[in-house]
Image: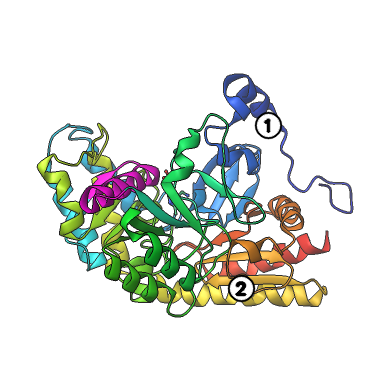
Amino acid sequence: MADKTGQMLRPTQRSQELRQRALTLTPGGVHSNVRLLGPQIFLDHGKGSRLFDVDGNEYIDYLLGQGPNFLGHAPDVVLDAVDAACRRGMVFGAQHELELEAGEAVLGALGWPDMLRFGMTGTEAVQAALRAARAVTGRQKFVRFAGQYHGWLDNVLVKVDQDGTPQLASAGQLASHLDDSIMLPWNNLELVEQVLDDRAEEVAAIITEPLMLNAGSIEPAPGFLEGLRAACDRHGVALIFDEVISGFRVALGGAAERYGVTPDLATYGKAMAGGWPVAALAGKARYIEGFGTGVVNHSGTFNATVMACAAVAATVKRLTDDPPYASLDKLGTRLQAGLRDLAAERGLEMNVQGLPMAFHVGFGSGPVTDYASLQHLDLARYANFAGTLVEHGIWVTGRGIWYLSAAHTDGDIDETLERVKAAMAA
Ligand code: PMP
């Protein structure tokens, strides 16, 4: 896009050249399908709240690599810890003391779980959680909610059509996996209770994002999580919180702490390690200790590498000693209000909702309370606007989610609002 003088706002010539090369090497030019939808720009580096592309353009980042860069890009505390640790070896395929430091830090921060296992990705942690729940309950199915994402594997990669009917989301998936889960709308406790009253003997677990961040930023309705907890207790069903995004982000203890409801098992990743790839499954002893007897399998060559444990220990220590949550509440609230004001000035109907450190922006009227009501927003219009935001130096995706990091400042918010204003004018 060009400005009034015909000057390109953000020239991307080198990115385009690299993209042509990438397209010959890699399907779609990307290594994760989620990125097919992202800005097709090659990044050179990131520091703090800022990203810099290969053409020298600078962006204020509100995507944070889909969440992990909760301390900002390239945080020194994590880099220094990883650098020092990995010079003594990277992967042992055996135990090392940093595992204990990282594990104690995570369990201490979360408070409720008895034990944990580290793994590589959120996708794997979810699979381990479902397996543990099936092993303990002796039941097969799980209840889940429309619009939530639990990784890319066959049994969880399920979307819903307009009337809420589950559909496979990828060619090549095993159709039989559609029978593994019972898909319900989020925030409707009555339906969950009905399903468990009728079919609890089939249901091993309820898995939910405790705060729905993969479609809108939808908080649980008052009593919803408490109701899930009570229904699970009544029927001997495991309650799994998928805190891969919310963990360590919405509070040190994640959504479980923020909303005061304790699951049986929970998955973590992203914000737990300041950008390092690692995930965890934490749980109550009854559900997780089966991994220790060999009765339930959870394995991985790269589980709990030296780097991962150093990154987790350093990140959780930073979040514990110098918690960013109160300041994120303030900054995010200011940014949300600023976005609403800018939209109002231009007469745009804009819905901004969710927590200050993870909120959703869309065109149309809210609030959004579940996946179906999210569809009433003009999602295509926002996706288009997101492209304009990127051209104005605001790094977001078309899905509408905005994340803040501990590295964002009041100055970033001021600058962001100026850039958004220019993008709206464009
Ligand atoms: N669960 C949730 C709630 C997620 O948001 C994601 C990823 N966005 C996953 C699981 C999968 O995590 P990963 O991409 O690390 O496999």
Earlier-in-chain disc, 1 versus 2:
1
Q: CA distance from mark 1 to mark 2?
A: 34 Å
Mark 1 or 2: the one toward you: 2
Residue type (three-letter) at the residue carrying disc 2: Gln
The single residue placed furthest to the right in the displayed view is: 5
The single residue placed furthest to the front in the displayed view is: 198
* Residue at mark 1: 14
**Residue closest to the eye, 380 or 160:** 160
Position of residue 89 measured from the top left corner of the image (x, y, whole percent): 19, 33
The stretch drawn in magenta includes residue 123? yes
**Residue closest to the eye, 144 or 104:** 144
> Which residue is at 67% across, 73% downward?
366
Q: Is residue 391 above or below residue 316?
A: above
Residue type (three-letter) at the residue carrying disc 1: Arg
For label 2, being within 8 Å of ligand 1 is answered no
Magenta residues, start to end: 117-139
The answer to which quarter of the image holds residue 180 is top left
The colour mode here is rainbow
- The numbered mark at residue 336 is 2
